[in-house]
Amino acid sequence: MQRAKTQVSVALGVLALGCGSAPGSEPPQVPVPVAESRLEPTTPKTPEQHFRANLRDAEARARQQGFSVTEVLHLDGHHAAILLYEPAQDSAPATRLTRFEAVSTAPGAVVSGESGMVELQKTRGGGQLWDLRGDGARFVVLGLTPCGASCGQAEPFVLELLSDRFVRAEHSPTCPTCIQDFDRDRIPEFSFRLLALKVAPCSRVSCGPSYGLEVEVRGIESWEGGRYARDLRDFVPIYFDRLRRAKRDGERVMRAKHKGGRCPLTALRTAAELYVYGRLIGESETDALASADAVMQGYDVKPCSTEFDLLAPPKPWPVLRSELVAAELPLLKLERRRPPARP
């Protein structure tokens, strides 16, 4: 009976070996069904998400450098913003500067700078973006004042907003906010200081940020397809209208009474405009100077010393007249190249 049990055990052992692997061989590769993956397919971030991520990165960098965010100026209708920062409170007031960064959807593409005061300049209609070329391009104009609201003059800092990033504008007018379509051709013109006659140096309290008693003549520049030009023939009719206004002002100035009793700034400005605008539309130097001399007849600059806190005696008309003649003026001879409209 014991032997029968042993034989049965051996038989079962052989049977077990037959169902398994032989000693020293690899186990069989049994196929196992794999469950279908339930992971959602990855999708690229939206422009909004890119923009928000760039905002967070910019703010984090600012905090690491000791700045705190004071304002985020979002640009209407675009995934873009201008961030304004100020240094930590323990910074000395004399060295306190406002920092700005222009952030959009492009990763790592940030334009930044510092100034005593930074302002986002808006259009007459309250818009934040400017079309400075008449072709639909989008520009942001920042006013940078070196030492705050109470001193210095704001300088423009112009950024172009391309499809997904900000870049410093390669070309921009001298005064981008001095925009007007004088000839109504849908290409804007910009006023700029074409000529200035400095009558005398002056204290800032008396004469303002320019530190000088002066008169100026405004010129025009406009986009001509590749640059902002000041020598376009399109400007002749505009300057002709300005000359007519200057002649009307000249008639009023010449009729004024008590010419020697006041600082003749209005007369000086009118005389300078008559000369400059006359020369720009083709008048001879002799004729343009004759118009200016007629306006200044009977006026004296000596009263300027009592009306203003001058730091030196004022220049008499003959000296200012010589500076007027020596000024370089543009020749209005080039044709405008019309910029193509942007899609």
Image: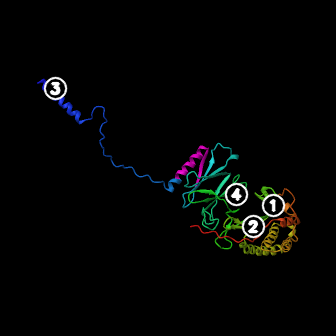
- Which residue matches tag 1? 213
Disc 3, SS: helix
Disc 2, SS: strand
Q: CA distance from mark 2 to mark 3?
A: 121 Å
In this rendering, which labeled residue sits more in front, label 2 or label 3? 3
Disc 4, SS: strand
Examine the rendered structure and indicate whether residue 338 appears above or below residue 18. below
Q: Which residues are magenta?
A: 52-72
- Which residue matches tag 3? 6
- Which residue matches tag 4? 155
Residue at x-position 27% and y-position 33%: 22
Place of residue 284 in the rendered image (x, y in percent of width and height, measured from the top left): 83, 74
Which is more N-terminal, label 1 or label 3?
Answer: 3
Residue 170 seen in the current view: yes
- Which residue matches tag 2? 218
Which is more N-terminal, label 3 or label 4?
Answer: 3
**Amino acid type, mark 4:** Glu
